[in-house]
Image (cartoon, rainbow, N blue to C red):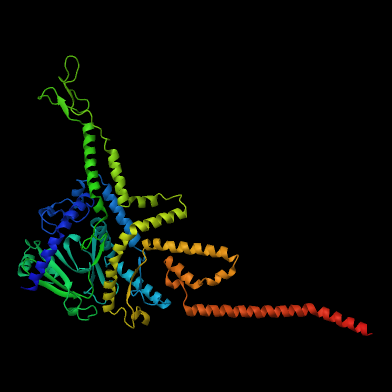
């Protein structure tokens, strides 16, 4: 049995494990995320072809017709924007660089400045116009919040090895294409990506290394748009290791093949795990995350049913079904119309509404209660409270922000955890291009070269947490000011430099704000010399003043002594 047969068996097992997730994804898309990919509509399995993909209308338009209350939709849209602003805001350095070893010595001034240099370079690469990071990372965040799992694929720019502006392309991978594989400890160790490519797309994607059937379809103008299944399998290589130089001995092996013909289109490897996976909440040891609305689906469905019934009741109240005296009579309800023969001799109408107890507002209270539960469960009240925060004191605003950090913090940590793979992948690509060589502007100090480095999160959500440290420092300084009035020796216990460093880190200020130790010593020496010169000048002035003031007295004493002798 060949390697493709083995991989197809593993793919089938991964498909079976994902079936229960697919049912949940369809419900999430139907009731809360009409803007997600159309492939989630397929009833025969998310990755299976279906004629519904040929419909002209967009997926969002088709699904929106089934929604009678859009509260869950706009709450999730607001949550996506809010979480994005708190974790990875565009134009903001939402992470730093630091030592990966918790027992490593504290970073020196030179180390911190190098870390900031690397950080700034990474953000320039990401937000370069051709990299695609901003758009595709936004899609990853949308998938994370609305479906529980979002995937970003940083692809090395193999076509231009000298391109320092865009050495990495960032691509969003739809969740329905991915079959994730984890080990017993819950670590991502592999995946299968199943894509349907048109024949001409496949020939371009794999530089013509496709089966004869796909080539024939691509060369025929009538069949060039025929679709074929292609599988990208990535798994840990037997005998591979992380620090390998040869691609054939890399830690992860990668194989692209056609699912039907088993033709291998490409074989290569990755030195780092190539996917950046973020999950809203871990569902046990499942490879797939759970979105925030998972625990609220019963309320969301109830809201849709009540909203639909309320709409029907309103229609019945405005245009109720009518009962008439004679079957052959047609009642004309248009304004100003005449309906002859529909009253009797006593003037009583021969028709009446069949429903006279319809109350369109009967479900309004229940609907509003459900909306309030969803606003609380999907964190809508947090954003609204901040928007309506005019007139609040600074203490109230900080308290509210801390509450938001405490509530959103655990889930934002899950999202930011995936960025560790992003950082490792980017640093690996830059390192293989010589970005950290001896003659490079990014050449690391010896202390950094001998230690592991990793990503340190400095997103706004982290600054909200750190704001508590700054408030504690300010309170401590206020306490010292009061205490020093009675006992000035208390100030001897405070390390001013350490207090400065702690305050700077709490506020997220750059390391360049602090002068180097050599500059500090030079300034202190110059200050001491100036003070010494000032003291000498003051002593000289004092002696001159004393000499000037003492001269008349000395003269008088001398004259008085002479008179006494005479």
Asked whether, in this view, residue 47 is left or right of residue 98, the answer is: left
Asked whether, in this view, residue 409 is left or right of residue 342, the answer is: right
> Whole-percent x and y of residue 360?
25, 34
Q: 20 or 142: which is nearer to us?
A: 20
> Whole-percent x and y of residue 540?
70, 80
Q: Quadrant of residue 289?
A: bottom left
Image height of 194 relative to 562, above or below: above
Q: 226 or 149: which is nearer to us?
A: 149
Q: 345 or 517: which is nearer to us?
A: 517
Asked whether, in this view, residue 495 is left or right of residue 152, the answer is: right
Residue farthest along the bottom direction in this orientation = 565
Image height of 425 relative to 406, above or below: below
Q: Give the residue displayed 13% in from the left and 26% down from the top.
A: 330
Which corner quadrant holds the C terminus?
Answer: bottom right
Q: Quadrant of residue 262?
A: bottom left
Q: Give the residue displayed 24% in from the left and 80% down from the top.
A: 243
> Whole-percent x and y of residue 248?
17, 79
Residue farthest along the right direction in this orientation = 566
Q: Give the residue displayed 21% in from the left and 47% down from the top.
A: 64
> Whole-percent x and y of residue 479?
53, 63
Residue 269 appears in the rendering: yes
Residue 68 appears in the rendering: no
Query: How many discs mark residues in the rendered view?
Result: 0
Which corner quadrant holds the N terminus?
Answer: bottom left
């Amino acid at each position: 049995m060949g390697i493709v047969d083995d991989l197809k068996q593993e793919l089938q097992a991964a498909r079976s494990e994902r079936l229960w997730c697919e049912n949940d994804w369809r419900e999430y898309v139907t009731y809360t995320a009409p803007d997600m990919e159309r492939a989630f509509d397929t009833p025969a399995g998310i990755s299976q072809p279906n004629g519904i993909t040929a419909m002209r209308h967009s997926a969002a338009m088709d699904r929106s017709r089934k929604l009678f209350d859009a509260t869950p939709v706009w709450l999730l849209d607001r949550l996506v924007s809010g979480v994005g602003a708190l974790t990875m805001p565009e134009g903001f350095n939402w992470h730093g660089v630091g030592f990966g070893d918790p027992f490593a010595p504290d970073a020196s001034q030179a180390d911190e400045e190098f870390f900031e240099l690397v950080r700034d370079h990474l953000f320039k690469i990401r937000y370069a116009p051709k990299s695609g990071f901003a758009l595709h990372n936004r899609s990853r965040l949308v998938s994370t919040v609305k479906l529980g799992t979002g995937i970003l694929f940083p692809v090395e720019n193999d076509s231009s090895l000298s391109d320092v502006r865009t050495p990495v392309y960032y691509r969003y991978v739809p969740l329905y294409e991915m079959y994730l594989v984890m080990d017993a400890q819950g670590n991502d160790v592999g995946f299968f990506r199943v894509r349907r490519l048109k024949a001409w797309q496949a020939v371009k994607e794999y530089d013509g290394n496709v089966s004869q059937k796909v080539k024939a379809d691509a060369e025929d103008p009538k069949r060039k748009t025929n679709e074929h299944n292609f599988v990208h399998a990535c798994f840990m290589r037997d005998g591979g290791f992380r620090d390998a130089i040869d691609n054939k001995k890399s830690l992860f092996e990668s194989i692209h093949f056609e699912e039907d013909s088993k033709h291998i289109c490409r074989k290569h490897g990755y030195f780092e795990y190539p996917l950046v996976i973020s999950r809203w909440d871990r569902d046990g040891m499942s490879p797939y995350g759970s979105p925030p609305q998972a625990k609220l689906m019963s309320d969301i469905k109830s809201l849709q049913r009540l909203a639909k019934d309320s709409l029907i009741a309103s229609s019945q109240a405005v245009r109720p079904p009518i009962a008439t005296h004679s079957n052959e009579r047609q009642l004309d309800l248009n304004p100003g119309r005449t309906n002859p023969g529909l009253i009797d001799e006593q003037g009583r109408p021969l028709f009446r509404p069949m429903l006279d107890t319809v109350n369109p507002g009967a479900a309004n209270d229940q609907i509003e209660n459900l909306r309030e539960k969803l606003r609380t469960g999907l964190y809508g009240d947090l954003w609204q409270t901040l928007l309506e925060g005019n007139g609040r004191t600074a203490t109230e605003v900080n308290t509210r922000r801390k509450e938001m950090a405490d509530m959103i913090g655990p889930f934002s940590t899950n999202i930011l955890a995936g960025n560790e793979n992003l950082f490792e992948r980017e640093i690996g690509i830059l390192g293989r291009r010589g970005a950290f060589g001896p003659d490079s502007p990014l050449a690391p100090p010896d202390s950094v070269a001998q230690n592991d480095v990793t990503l340190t999160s400095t997103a706004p959500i982290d600054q909200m947490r750190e704001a508590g440290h700054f408030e504690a420092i300010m309170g401590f300084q206020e306490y010292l000011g009061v205490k020093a009035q009675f006992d000035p020796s208390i100030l001897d216990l405070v390390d001013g430099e350490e207090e400065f460093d702690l305050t700077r880190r709490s506020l997220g200020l750059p390391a360049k704000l602090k002068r180097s130790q050599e500059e500090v010593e030079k300034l202190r020496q110059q200050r001491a010399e100036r003070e010494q010169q000032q003291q000498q000048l003051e002593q000289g002035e004092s002696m001159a003043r004393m000499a000037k003031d003492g001269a008349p007295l000395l003269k008088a004493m001398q004259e008085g002594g002479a008179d006494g002798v005479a």
